[in-house]
Amino acid sequence: MTLAPLTVLDTVTATADLNALLRDEARKLGLDAIGFARLGSSGELAERLDYFLKHGRHGDMDWMEENADRRGDPNRLWPEAKSAIMVGQSYAPPSNPLDALAERDRGIVSVYAKGRDYHDVVKKKIKALARTFAAKSGADVKVFVDTAPLMEKPLAMKAGLGWQGKHTVLVSREHGDWLFLGAILTTADLDPDAEEVDHCGSCSRCLDICPTKAFPAPYQLDARRCLAYLSVEHKGHIPPEFRVPMGNRVFGCDDCLAVCPWNKFAAAATEMRFAAQPATDNPPLAELLALDDAEFRVRFAGTPVKRTGRNRIVRNALIAAGNSGDKSLLRLITPLLEDASPLVRAMAIWSARRLTSDTELAPLKSRYEPGETDPEVAREWAMPVEGHSI
């Protein structure tokens, strides 16, 4: 959105003073990183995006194709803009999120989604920063937090906040892999910061740990194989080959972020800035499997999880249940064989098959398979299981 200047009585004109003003205000607002970049088109960036889209690596994310020509050049969004003010908010966790993979009775929620939606939290601070800047500089501003065709990570690298690692995530020498990003475009001509260089070296930990081999090569991601994409963005059934590797992840995947050695320099976020409620961390699978739509909306109100919807979260929880080896969950899985959502019914079949023998499954199959009208769910009844968990 465009924010008109509040007042220009104390207009600051020197670019060095403007940069200093912004750094000071960002600190006061609790933002953890800020940098400045001059705008300009990047042929390399546009080529990389075009390659990604042409190879279909964006999966169901059709919005990435929309206005693709504008993503490589911020000035196509706003021709009058001269500079980008890039800001970062740390969400570094207090402990290693990979430890939760061993808690098979719980559904892992990605670190960024454990509390209030970061779009709301960060945008509020960035708008306040933009208003102050507009009032002092007389310049026009527009605020972006992951809501427009603006490629924030390359701009953040250009502004010195970090570099895009081999897993394509921004890495900061100070904050590791845990930065929410936002941008302010402005008509002011600010002094740019030095662009950050790549410090990955020969390290390949982020590539090696990926459970589904979602990186065709360093600095390339195939979202169709990424558990973060599959568990959150993908609207259909989870392909069979990814269900066992999914483990107990029900929203997102932090593996490639958490293993990065640069995280050792990242202090845990000092405030519960994003906490929505006390018990947001990795809910028990039994709780997730029992949620109806109304209960889901209340349980995850104000968090990124709510946007994904009850059906996809229960779909994911059923996969986690099938991987858990816990037969006691069958009491919650069995009713879902007649759920209204085909996504849920299909994964209830897979989960029940994983936790039972063929003899135990036979009565369920004879009861529910004859009346199944959805072809995808019907195919699930006919599928062999990939190795029982129990």
Image (cartoon, rainbow, N blue to C red):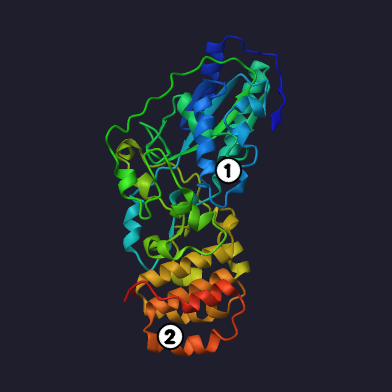
| Image label count | 2
Q: Say which amino acid is labelled 1.
A: His
Badge 1 or badge 2: first in the primary sequence: 1
- The nearer-to-camera label among 1 and 2 is 2
- Work out which quarter of the rendered image holds the N terminus and state it: top right
Q: Position of residue 101 (x, y in %)?
A: 34, 59
Q: Residue at x 54, y 57 (%)?
A: 234
Crowding around mark 1 (Cα neighbors within 10 Å: few <14, some 14 to 19, many 20+) is some
Give the residue number, with chain letter if any, for mark 1: 119
Q: State the image coordinates of residue 346 (x, y, percent, origin top left).
A: 52, 73
Nearest the viewer among 242 and 314 is 242
Label 2 element class:
helix
- The answer to whether 128 appears left or right of 273 in the picture is right
Question: What is the three-letter code of the residue carrying label 2?
Answer: Leu
Q: Quadrant of residue 53?
A: top right
Q: Dot 2 corresponds to which residue? A: 361
Residue 236 occupies quadrant: bottom right
Q: Residue at x 44, y 50 (%)?
A: 111
Q: Residue furthest top?
A: 14
Quadrant where the C terminus is found in the figure: bottom left
